[in-house]
Image (cartoon, coloured by chain):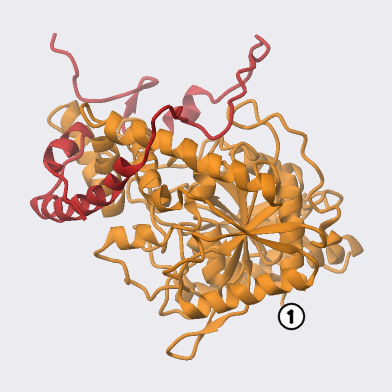
Chain colours: A orange, B red
Amino acid sequence: MSLASQSITSLRSQLTNGDITPSDILDSLAQAIDTTNGNVGAYLTHDLESAKLEANTADLSKPLGGIPIAIKDNINVLGQPCTCASKFLAGGYTAPYDATVIAQLRSAGAIPFGRTNMDEFAMGSATESSALGQTTNPHDITRAPGGSSGGSAAAVAAHSAIAALGSDTGGSIRQPASHCGVVGLKPSYGRVSRYGLVAFSSSLDQIGPITQNVADSALLLNAISGHDPADSTSLQDNTPDFTEGLDRGVAGMKLGLPKEYFAEGIDPDVRKSVDASIAKLEAAGAELVEISLPHTDYAVATYYIIAPAEAASNLSRFDGVRYGNRAEQPEDILDLYRRSRAEGFGSEVKRRIILGTYVLSSGYYDAYYGRAQKVRTLIRQDFDNAYEQVDAILSPVSPSAAPLLGAHKDNPLQQYLADIYTISANLAGICGISVPCAPITSDTGTKLPVGLQILGPHMGEKKLLQIAYAAENT
Amino acid sequence: MSKENIDVRYVADLARLDLSDQETETFQGQLESIIGYINKLKDVDIEGIEPIALSTPVSHGLREDTSQSNLGQADLLQNAPDSTKGQIRVPKVVDA
């Protein structure tokens, strides 16, 4: 078994025993990237030389000492490009600082290694809006890896990353993890600093780990959690040791099944696979409770008002002045803005900027953005009420397994509707994780992964990870 | 599903974004169906419901008033497409 295909836990014991060095792991990863990247395209860039320099001085006594971590290309790593998979930033931006999560990883001994592909500015759910290359699903390269953190999920699934960081605004960690058969955690809003994450939708974005297993997810969450003075939305909350007591089991826990999530529209094979995982948790001693999240039907509409509104505002900083693309020979400053943006942004980004600008514009603000903020309150209240009855909520991550490449190319609304199970967690600020269930068989005979989603209350990651561990190991 | 009128070119102009004729036409149709869909929020009873901009409270604590090191001028200018004498250069924005 190559080093590149092993978990953090396994590599850590070999590192501390002196059987291997961090440099050995990097060599194994570089080889795996060479072998897989032609087909899978998970990585945009990687810099082996500079990672090796860091490996030489890695402190193996630290919790992640000597472990390389792949980084989604919307998180700033000092001295590296950070393209957001956009032409706007490709070739025109080098990060002048480390994001807080990167500084935290470094102080835990980890080595940021490699930049993973994504939907442009994290807008999309198939990694197909990337302007810088296609990523495919390692389980079936005719299919998409999911998105927007598709490169991170595909890298871990293809054994070309030990673990990776992604970001999740409406499911962008959980859904690609589900489609690629790995573990993806979206922390509670405020658990992890967003400083140095290129902002898409600031009230929804969270950085989180994509890993081979739940124990590794807990290890990474330990490293990246905590208050950051540079992010006023990161919370002053004591960070527990998420690795402690992972194996406590689910006996006596109440797990909610939202009737709205299991109503219709789920692929029958996906349903069967998710039901089997749920049955195993019941057999392990959990009590299943039917619950209701009555505003579920409005979640997608609410999200596709709030997220584009915030995106339109956040992406106004990409104006061709301070970094990134600048149009040649502008007539005046307005021409510079308009053409720099037109040249630099792809279709999905333009579409969302226009939608966001529309819902914020005079005469429409109250009808759309103002109303969506109130429905957001109702969606959060649905979850508050649910967590008075249950410890966590179970559902599919996505109504179907990984789609064929290009499946939603001309119909963005159809793609948005597939976000139904994941986006509410971002609107409500709660935590969620995707854990692999039994794979299903596609019509061409390939095995496609399916994910079980577990949603926990705000700052409820400790118990969430225990349930995920039980789902993984029973 | 109801269709909603959006003047894509006008809104793109508000967003300082040039669009080709082809883009305008494609987005027009796509955004009409998306807006038709999000109009379903009009069915929700929001009487007396407080809006939220963030799902969690923000920590408004003030930091100590001490100087901190931050990025220097050279770090900030390294990504500028055009700079001179420690400044970012842009087309003229005011008439003399």
Report which quarter residue A85 is drawn in: bottom left
Image coordinates of residue A53 in percent, x first then y, are 69, 52
Question: In the displayed structure, would residue A189 be above or below residue A184?
Answer: above
Q: Residue at x 8, y 51 (%)?
A: B21
Question: In the displayed structure, would residue B3 be above or below residue B62?
Answer: below
Depth check: give the residue in front, B75 or B55: B55
Depth check: give the residue in front, B19 or B27: B27
Which quarter of the figure is the C terminus of chain A placed in?
Answer: bottom right
Question: In the displayed structure, would residue A320 be above or below residue B27?
Answer: above
Q: Tell me if residue A329 can be seen.
A: no
Q: Residue furthest bottom?
A: A445
Q: Tell me if residue A399 can be seen.
A: yes
Q: Residue at x 43, y 71 (%)?
A: A144
Helix, strand or loop at disc 1?
A: loop
Report which quarter residue B61 is drawn in: top right
Q: Residue at x 86, y 64 (%)?
A: A13
Identify which amino acid the numbered label 1 is placed on: Met
Depth check: give the residue in front, A2 or A387: A387
Image coordinates of residue A192 in percent, x first then y, are 63, 40
Q: Can you identify the residue that label 1 sits on?
A: A1
- Decide if residue A52 is on the left or right side of residue A246: left
- Decide if residue A51 is on the left or right side of residue A317: right
Question: Total marks drawn?
Answer: 1
- The chain under label 1 reads A
Question: In the displayed structure, would residue A465 be above or below residue A342?
Answer: below
Image coordinates of residue A379 in percent, x first then y, are 49, 43
Which quarter of the figure is the N terminus of chain A placed in?
Answer: bottom right
Q: Residue furthest left?
A: B21
Q: Residue furthest right?
A: A17
Disc 1 packing (10 Å; few <14; some 14–19; many ≥20): few
